[in-house]
Amino acid sequence: MILDKSYQIAKVDNRIYGSFIEHLGRAVYGGIYEPSHPEADEQGFRRDVMELVRQLQVPIVRYPGGNMVSAYNWEDGVGPRKERPRRLELAWRTIETNEMGTNEFADWAAKVNAEVMMAVNLGTRGVDAARNLIEYTNHPGGTYWSELRKQHGYKEPHNIKTWCLGNEMDGPWQVGQKTPYEYGRIAQETGKAMKLVDPTIELVACGSSNSSMPTFPEYEATTLDLAYEQIDYISLHQYYGNRSNDTANYLAKNLDMDNFIKTVISTCDYIKAKHRSKKTINLSFDEWNVWYHSNEADNLIEPWSVAPPQLEDIYNFEDALLVGSMLITFLQHADRVKMACLAQLVNVIAPIMTENNGRAWKQTIFYPYYHASVYGRGISLKPILNSPKYDSADFTDIPYVDSAAVLNEKEDEVTIFMVNKHLHDSIVLTADLRSFEGFALKEHIVLENDDLKAVNTKEREEVKPHNKGKSVLREGILEADLPKTSWNVIRLAKKKV
């Protein structure tokens, strides 16, 4: 590898380390909110969960959905709790009690030092509900909806600046599914109205629900063509699994994510050229993760219950490796991927798990997410890497080593993130770091385990990092041992004079 501080991709937007809380399963009820829990604060929020979220330094959290937002009436979740209606939640076929809503979530986000990314319902509703909601959250006062917020105990506006125009509107599973033209038009008109209320907001339009949708990338192209001047980002969603139990193929799936990102960038730039526009549309990868472990269990859940254990994937060690490679992929595209949301944050396909009235613990995927969020802030650099390659069932020329690097000029630190995908062998890295004169090796963190299927439970943490990685830096040349199937974080800092 050659790593030079002049080989810069872009400044990392910290919001690529965002996450997602949907009214789904135990993400809200039993996850972030559980008034009966011994660790609950005065608002019913679990302190143990908030502490883990703060450790992750999550900068922004998408809310309240997700699929559920497409039939959600935001008015149900504000005002006195005893007056809030219980509703049939159609996306996941549960009962929504509406104990948590917009104001409570804004309070929770402030407590964990995160911004809110709010989604509006463009399935069963549209322009009117969206413009009323942003008036409620962002307008200072003197109008019906802003004064109603004050009556509900919130004198100051929440000033939510990032808004999603619906969710996965191309999906046949979505309440109010729309064709590309139908969605493009409602996104255009809703965005126009919302920016009249608050011109300072940023808007995220729906892209395809995943890269295998039959209308991809036509959906993006049509939506952008219609709503280009109103929107600022286009969304991407993608989940991966290892149903065939082919680890070598599974660990290569970030190449699919890389191709997805490149295709959407090309589509955005084509429409930019078509419109002769000077405005560049960036990407919000606002749903991404591993999701497949819980599928069979989810089929057994009885409908119309309150906060059942839905989508509770128990992640293993190989899942953590793929999550690491996906984070590396975002850093490699830091010039265009400006936001991303690990879906989701607590219990539902999440890095944090809880038991009701019990403990909270870190899943295996917690660690690469934590390392990237804490150490991956600054300028994304472009490593020039020569790695051995392999082929798998679905991919060819797969580098055994994925890599990204971030220069934190404020702290005079550089962090190299690497995944070794080789199932049997360690790989020795030789890196030319001579442009980082005066830097010394600070630590080499490694996440490794001989059992690819090892998991963490409330009783025992089988998968956790150590900082005993084998690295030596001499005269600007780094030699590092990357153990087989491992996530590596190599940190260097400028020597203090």
Image (cartoon, rainbow, N blue to C red):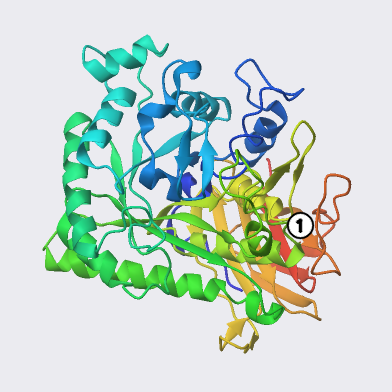
Q: In which quarter of the image is residue 144?
A: top left
Where is mark 1, residue-wise? 444
In this view, the residue in front, 457 or 254, is 457
Q: Which residue is drawn at 27% across and 50% down?
A: 232
> What count of labels does the image hold?
1
Dot 1 lies on which element?
strand
Q: Where is residue 60 in the image (x, y as percent from the top left)?
A: 48, 40
Q: In this view, does 275 lie above or below 88?
A: below
Q: Is 264 left, or right, of 407 in this rendering?
A: left
The quadrant of the rendering that contains the N terminus is: bottom right
Q: Is residue 293 visible?
A: no
Which residue is the extreme one toward the right?
459
Q: Is residue 475 above or below residue 1?
A: above
The quadrant of the rendering that contains the C terminus is: top right
In this view, the residue in front, 242 or 140, is 242
Q: In which quarter of the image is residue 253?
A: bottom right
Q: Position of residue 3 (x, y in %)?
A: 57, 67
Q: Residues within 10 Å of mark 1 (few under 14, many from 20)?
A: many
Q: Which residue is drawn at 44% across and 63% down?
A: 333
Looking at the rendered structure, the kind of residue marked 1 is: His
Q: Is 379 left, or right, of 74 in this rendering?
A: right
Q: Which residue is drawn at 64% across and 44% down?
A: 308
Q: Is 469 left, or right, of 274 in this rendering?
A: right
Q: Where is residue 252 in the image (x, y as percent from the top left)?
A: 60, 77
Q: Is residue 487 visible?
A: yes
Q: Where is residue 429 in the image (x, y as percent from the top left)?
A: 71, 74
